[in-house]
């Protein structure tokens, strides 16, 4: 686990050193530098967090004749198998690190052949001096971030935007077009970022850069496979169960490969519980960590019960009101605004675990593959109703409009009571369901700010931003797939990496902690998309086949425990002086007016509604504005600095 960075097309004194120093937190155990001597202006470096081959795994790593060199961020879990295969083919290894498999694998199989064989999480840059070109790649699900900037023959890349901003040729300017996606989704979908001219390399892609003519090409090398709904054939449930059990346990085994101790995040959910249970087959001394808020939605008691059953050394970390003061620093680590107060919890959790460990496993990724979110069930139910009774959604919309929100709470599982705004989202979703494509319906049900709300809060200068023109449509080739799988696949194009995973990577790496996710093993994902829908959603049961696996491990009250929504309950912190000060400092009339995006009176009215009603959506809307303003103060104004 490391941070990588580099540039080509120009020279700038001290730049490589500055790019590394600003992300020292990603790799405090060592550093590596490479500058080409073949006449091509190319430099790259890395900061190392030592996990595998502690003494001999320093980077950069070369092939036998040093014509190929790589800087690597991440872990290749199946490196021992790849190493054995490559040695059999005549390659000579100088280290015992997983990184060295990349240079020899590229020699043997080429870039796409190499990528197809890697099982892990990664972002790397591989330079071929014979061809004077390099490849940058990201893992299949986007666990490891990678940013780049290209302008006037100059190209820079890095694990964090902060590295790119060290160059005199890269300026921090807001990407105005990204504000509307941010308000809608609370994140900016790839490849855009909130920085003008800085992009993320999309997941499952590699970038090929030819130094001779400063051209680049971005190519996808993997995507979630979809069966054809009309011709798909399925195996029996016992066959799928046996395959899932074997693959999952193997994935956990691979993720535990390390030369340092490995622990885990443990929540009340079935995903992390199964992960830790599988870990106990390989170690009897496992540290587990859970975060809580001392609120009614706190999952620490349930996680404590699971830890006791599994016999782990369990640690609880509680978020306090004063932790809101950490938000500016967290946003500096995040690089990008992600409009969610849960960032604080992830930061605190990583901070606590890093006192004991360098590596933890977690359960993320299961909900996306096996349908664990409530909105997935809702969309499937609505689609089934619409197919049976065409036009039923338009009829249902006014019925829902007339139904008290308190009654609707009994039929929907959301992190908090729906309130007036949650009810509004459902009515809008039903009213326009047949007019939207699947991705727009997916976003409509989870949107934070509806289009009319965004239009209303913008100043006249920015009202034109309120649109859905930026929103991607479902790919035409995917429309022949099974409906649930089509819905699940959408999450791998934006939701997973730009919402869920980025929050974990940036906050764990802020504390030099590596975070591994067995459920993101591509073999497990591919298996999930070969299964029929009823093995994922079965009646009222989500993640059906995964819960069947849990039945073999846990007593029923743990295996079938109702999902406890994991969110930071802002409504329980509204009256605390730390939260009040944060809102007052960032969203006062002068600050909002100075930024110019939003009407100060509209923002003040929103804050008043939040304090008066304590509604879930109003709280989250205010937090999204706070995060956006703090991001500007940290990166654009530079009025808050941590470097």
Image: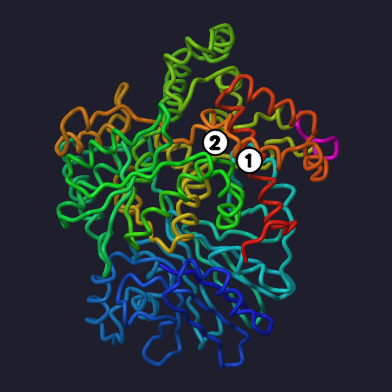
Task: Provide the secondary structure element on which disc 2 rests.
Answer: helix
Mark 1 neighbour class, 10 Å CA radius: few under 14, some 14 to 19, many 20 or more: few
Quarter of the picture containing the C terminus is bottom right
Task: Identify the residue shown where x is 34% and y is 38%.
Answer: 370
Quarter of the picture containing the N terminus is bottom left
Corner quadrant of residue 218: bottom right
Q: Nearer the viewer, residue 65 or 517?
A: 517
- Cα distance in 3D space between marks 1 and 2: 8 Å
Mark 2 neighbour class, 10 Å CA radius: few under 14, some 14 to 19, many 20 or more: some
Residue at mark 1: 471
Q: Return the residue found at the far front.
A: 577
Q: Note whether 438 is above or below 256 in the view shown.
A: above
Task: Identify the residue shown where x is 67% and y is 80%.
Answer: 9
Residue at mark 2: 439
Q: Are marks 1 and 2 in contact (CB under 8 Å)?
A: yes
- Number of on-image labels: 2
Q: Picture coordinates of residue 187 (x, y %)?
A: 59, 45
Task: Identify the residue shown where x is 39% and y is 81%.
Answer: 58
Q: Note whether 251 is above or below 60 in the view shown.
A: above
Q: Which residues are magenta?
A: 455-462
Say if residue 54 shows up in the picture.
yes
Asked whether, in this view, residue 623 is left or right of residue 537, the answer is right
Asked whether, in this view, residue 106 is left or right of residue 253, the answer is right
Q: Picture coordinates of residue 169 (x, y %)?
A: 73, 72
Q: Picture coordinates of residue 71 (x, y %)?
A: 46, 76
In this picture the colour scheme is rainbow
């Amino acid at each position: 686990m490391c941070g990588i960075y580099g540039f080509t097309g120009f020279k700038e004194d001290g730049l490589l050193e500055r790019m590394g120093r600003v992300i020292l937190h990603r790799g405090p155990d060592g550093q590596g530098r490479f500058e080409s001597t073949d006449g091509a202006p190319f430099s790259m470096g890395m900061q190392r967090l030592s996990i595998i081959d502690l003494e001999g795994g320093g980077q950069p790593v070369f092939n036998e004749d040093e014509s190929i060199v790589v800087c690597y961020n991440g872990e290749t879990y199946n490196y021992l198998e790849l190493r054995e295969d490559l040695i059999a083919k005549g390659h000579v290894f100088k280290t015992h690190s997983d990184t060295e498999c990349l240079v020899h694998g590229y020699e043997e199989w080429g870039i796409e052949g190499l990528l197809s064989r890697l099982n892990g999480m990664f972002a790397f840059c591989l330079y071929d001096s014979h061809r004077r070109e390099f490849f940058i790649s990201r893992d299949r699900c986007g666990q490891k971030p990678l940013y780049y900037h290209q302008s006037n023959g100059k190209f820079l890349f890095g694990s964090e935007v902060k590295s790119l901003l060290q160059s005199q040729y890269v300026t921090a300017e807001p990407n105005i077009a990204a504000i509307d996606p941010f308000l809608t989704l609370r994140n900016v979908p790839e490849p855009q970022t909130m920085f003008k001219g800085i992009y993320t390399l999309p997941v499952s892609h590699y970038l090929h850069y030819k130094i001779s003519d400063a051209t680049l090409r971005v190519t996808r090398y993997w995507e979630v496979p979809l069966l054809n709904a009309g011709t798909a054939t399925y195996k029996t449930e016992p066959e799928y169960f046996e395959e899932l059990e074997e693959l999952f346990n193997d994935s956990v085994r691979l993720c535990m490969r390390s030369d340092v101790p490995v622990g885990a995040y443990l929540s009340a959910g079935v995903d992390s519980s199964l992960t830790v249970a599988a870990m106990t087959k390989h170690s009897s001394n496992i540290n587990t960590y859970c975060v809580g808020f001392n609120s009614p939605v706190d999952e620490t008691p349930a996680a404590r019960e699971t830890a006791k059953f599994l016999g782990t050394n369990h640690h609880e970390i509680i978020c306090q009101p004063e932790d809101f003061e950490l938000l500016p620093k967290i946003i500096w680590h995040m690089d990008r605004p992600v409009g969610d107060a849960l960032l604080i919890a992830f930061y605190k959790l990583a901070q606590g675990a890093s006192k004991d460990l360098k590596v933890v496993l977690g359960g993320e990724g299961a909900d996306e593959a096996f349908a664990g979110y409530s909105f997935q069930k809702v969309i499937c139910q609505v689609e089934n109703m619409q197919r049976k009774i065409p036009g039923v959604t338009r009829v249902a919309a006014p019925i829902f409009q007339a139904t008290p929100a308190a009654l609707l709470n009994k039929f929907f599982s959301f992190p908090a009571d729906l309130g007036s705004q949650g009810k509004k989202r459902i009515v809008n979703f039903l009213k326009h369901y047949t007019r939207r494509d699947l991705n727009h319906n997916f976003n409509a049900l989870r949107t934070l700010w509806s289009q009319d709300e965004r239009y209303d809060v913008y100043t006249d200068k920015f009202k034109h931003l309120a649109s859905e023109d930026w929103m991607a449509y479902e790919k035409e080739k995917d429309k022949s797939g099974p409906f649930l799988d089509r819905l699940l696949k959408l999450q791998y194009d934006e939701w997973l990496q730009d919402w869920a995973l980025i929050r974990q990577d940036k906050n764990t790496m802020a504390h030099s902690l590596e975070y591994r996710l067995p459920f993101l093993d591509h073999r497990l994902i591919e298996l999930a998309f070969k299964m029929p829908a009823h093995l994922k959603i079965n009646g009222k049961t989500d993640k059906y086949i995964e819960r069947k696996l849990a039945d073999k491990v846990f007593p029923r009250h743990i295996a079938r425990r109702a999902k406890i929504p994991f969110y930071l309950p802002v409504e329980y912190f509204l009256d605390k002086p730390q939260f009040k000060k944060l809102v007052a400092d960032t969203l006062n009339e002068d600050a909002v007016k100075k930024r110019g995006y939003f009407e100060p009176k509209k923002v003040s009215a929103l804050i008043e509604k939040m304090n008066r009603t304590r509604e879930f959506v109003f709280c989250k809307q205010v937090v999204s504005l706070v995060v956006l303003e703090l991001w500007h103060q940290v990166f654009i104004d530079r009025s808050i600095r941590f470097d």
